[in-house]
Image: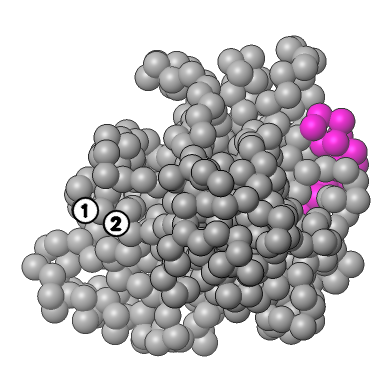
């Protein structure tokens, strides 16, 4: 029998066509980047090449529907403060001091990944402590959430942030008991700081992005949505770096989607329109409704248990509603950061107003996080066909913040099972580097609700393994409006799949420890730790 010269047959595997498949196949054939056939070994057609999967489990490739690849790439070039050797304020200061020894005086020392919850003191280093440890350099520390900056005196002086500075709308500069600046800046104040410091060299950033994307392929990602072009160092700087990669013909990325952190008028001024594309898609505008739990800046109805604060909106509520409606009228999908219930309720109202203004668009507007569910929110979301994009690894990574901020109400936060039960599309993602970068850790946390660190948070909201895996397989493809051609292994669908060292649906296996043995993207093997593939064989030779 003649066979296509670019066809590949994968045999001796356990192949789940989707996360809901309960009768796995044993073999599949790819041709020209798509699935040509799936079934049992004895029924399969011949192919130019045969790859023995040695009993590995195959599932469709994963999508991280909310990740900051640019921020991860940016962090690779900076001082890391999130390792096992950073457990006290003294450890933070030591890392900064060591970096200063190899950095020219008066230059920037940039540190990332800082999380005070991991320190014995549970606090930020003070401006004075940093000054003493690093007296001759400019220092900026970026908290792992990306919403807080910590600076030393030299950096404050260079940026012209003096003692008389006023807090900007939706942001603040921290002050000590005497009213003196302590070096910290939150929300819009931090954002202004991040925009003001010099950008990392574009070529170096592009190279780091390539490495970051290759790492994601090794973790099983075949698609990802960059969650806010502009969040890390400003839109134009970041867009220029992404364009460097796009113009590089040797670069073959995962299937990428982009959220532009722009208002509709700013997008229009740059000549942007919503664009669907299988590899380089930009159909989404990103907005921030409120702050975060860690800084107690999320807009909540019931005050936080430990501060009695209600948080705040990042911009005027009416203005936020206006830009969401404008984006809808322009055909943009919107993705809005909403942590508090006040924020989510207001954004749902904006979705409703947009739908009334121009019904039937089916844009699949998204709420990112949905940390504190508003009363009646899920029924309203279902009526709108809106999506909830969540980050289950937060349940472990932010455990201390969640428990302290919400007290006895913590178990009602970060819903999952109730979202699915309400008929609302639940999409899993990482929000890395804020959340854990591994999709497998995220899935495990969706199943155990952070039980690896203590009592589960909201055990009733736990997902099954199939639901958790499905949120990264079909959920991510659906969020990108690509479910018709990827996210399932069936003839005619994209040949995007991964081979695993274990069956992720087997309750006896450690889901978080899953290793990806092979990643196939567009029909091309991009990552492989199995033995080399065999030359083409006939059916008789195979069996």
The answer to the question of whether label 2 and label 1 lie on touching residues, with beta carbons closer than 8 A, is yes
Q: Secondary structure at mark 2?
A: helix
Residue 174 percent across, percent down from the top left: 45, 60
Report whether residue 334 is seen: yes
Residue hosting label 2: 208
* Residue 135 falls within the magenta-colored stretch: no
Q: Observer-nearest residue: 443 or 113?
A: 443
Q: Residue furthest top?
A: 357
* CA gap, disc 2 and disc 1: 6 Å
Magenta segment: 366-385
Q: Observer-nearest residue: 492 or 266?
A: 492
Q: How many marks?
A: 2
Residue at the (71%, 81%) spot, across then down = 509
Residue hosting label 1: 204
Assign the C terminus to one quadrant of the image.
bottom right
Instruction: Identify whether 351 is placed above or below 506.
Output: above
Residue at the (58%, 15%) spot, across then down = 330
Instruction: Identify whether 214 is placed above or below 503.
Output: above
Residue 540 percent across, percent down from the top left: 60, 64
Crowding near the residue tagged with mark 2, few <14, some 14–19, many ≥20 C-alpha atoms within 10 Å: many
């Amino acid at each position: 029998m003649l066979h296509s010269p670019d066809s590949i047959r994968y045999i001796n595997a356990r192949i789940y066509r989707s996360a809901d498949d309960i009768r796995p196949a044993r073999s599949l054939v790819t041709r020209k980047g798509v699935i040509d056939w799936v079934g049992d070994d004895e029924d399969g057609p011949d192919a130019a090449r045969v790859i023995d999967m040695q009993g590995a489990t195959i599932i469709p490739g994963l999508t991280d529907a909310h990740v900051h690849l640019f921020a991860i790439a940016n962090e690779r070039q900076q001082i890391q403060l999130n390792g096992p050797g950073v457990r006290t304020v003294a450890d933070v200061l030591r890392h900064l001091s060591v970096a200063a020894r190899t950095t020219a005086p008066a230059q920037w020392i940039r540190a990332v990944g800082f999380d005070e919850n991991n320190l014995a003191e549970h606090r930020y280093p003070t401006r004075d402590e940093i000054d003493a440890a690093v007296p001759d350099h400019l220092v900026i520390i970026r908290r792992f959430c990306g919403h807080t900056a910590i600076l030393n005196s030299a950096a404050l002086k260079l940026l012209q942030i003096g003692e008389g500075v006023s807090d900007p709308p939706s942001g603040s500069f921290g002050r000590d008991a005497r009213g003196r600046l302590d070096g910290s800046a939150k929300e819009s104040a931090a954002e202004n700081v991040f925009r003001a410091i010099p950008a990392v060299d574009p070529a170096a950033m592009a190279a780091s992005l390539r490495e970051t994307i290759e790492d994601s392929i090794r973790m099983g990602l075949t698609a990802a949505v960059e969650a806010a072009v502009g969040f890390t160092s400003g839109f134009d700087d970041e867009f220029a770096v992404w364009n460097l990669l796009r113009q590089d013909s040797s670069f073959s990325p995962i299937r990428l989607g982009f959220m532009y952190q722009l208002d509709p008028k700013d997008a229009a001024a740059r000549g942007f329109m919503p664009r669907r594309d299988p590899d380089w898609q930009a159909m989404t505008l990103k907005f921030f409704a409120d702050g975060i739990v860690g800084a107690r800046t999320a807009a909540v109805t019931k005050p936080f248990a430990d501060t009695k604060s209600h948080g705040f909106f990042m911009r005027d509520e009416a203005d936020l509603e206006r830009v969401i409606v404008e984006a809808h009228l322009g055909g943009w999908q919107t993705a809005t950061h909403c942590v508090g219930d006040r924020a989510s309720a207001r954004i749902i109202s904006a979705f409703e107003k947009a739908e009334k203004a121009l019904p039937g668009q089916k844009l699949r507007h998204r709420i990112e996080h949905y940390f504190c569910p508003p009363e009646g929110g899920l029924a309203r979301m279902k009526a709108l066909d809106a999506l909830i994009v969540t980050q289950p690894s937060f349940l472990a990574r932010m455990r201390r913040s969640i428990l302290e901020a919400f007290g006895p109400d913590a178990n009602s936060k970060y819903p999952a099972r109730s979202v699915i039960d309400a008929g609302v599309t639940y999409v899993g993602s990482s929000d890395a580097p804020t959340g854990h970068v591994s999709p497998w850790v995220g899935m495990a946390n969706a199943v155990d609700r952070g039980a690896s660190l203590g009592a589960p948070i909201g055990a009733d909201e736990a997902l099954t393994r199939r639901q958790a895996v499905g949120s990264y397989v079909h959920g991510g493809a659906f969020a990108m409006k690509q479910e018709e051609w990827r996210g399932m292994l069936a003839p005619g669908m994209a040949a995007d799949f991964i081979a695993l060292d274990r069956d992720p649906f087997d309750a006896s296996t450690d889901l978080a420890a899953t290793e990806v043995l092979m990643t196939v993207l567009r029909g091309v093997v991009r990552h492989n730790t199995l033995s080399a593939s065999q030359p083409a064989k006939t059916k008789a030779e195979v069996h």
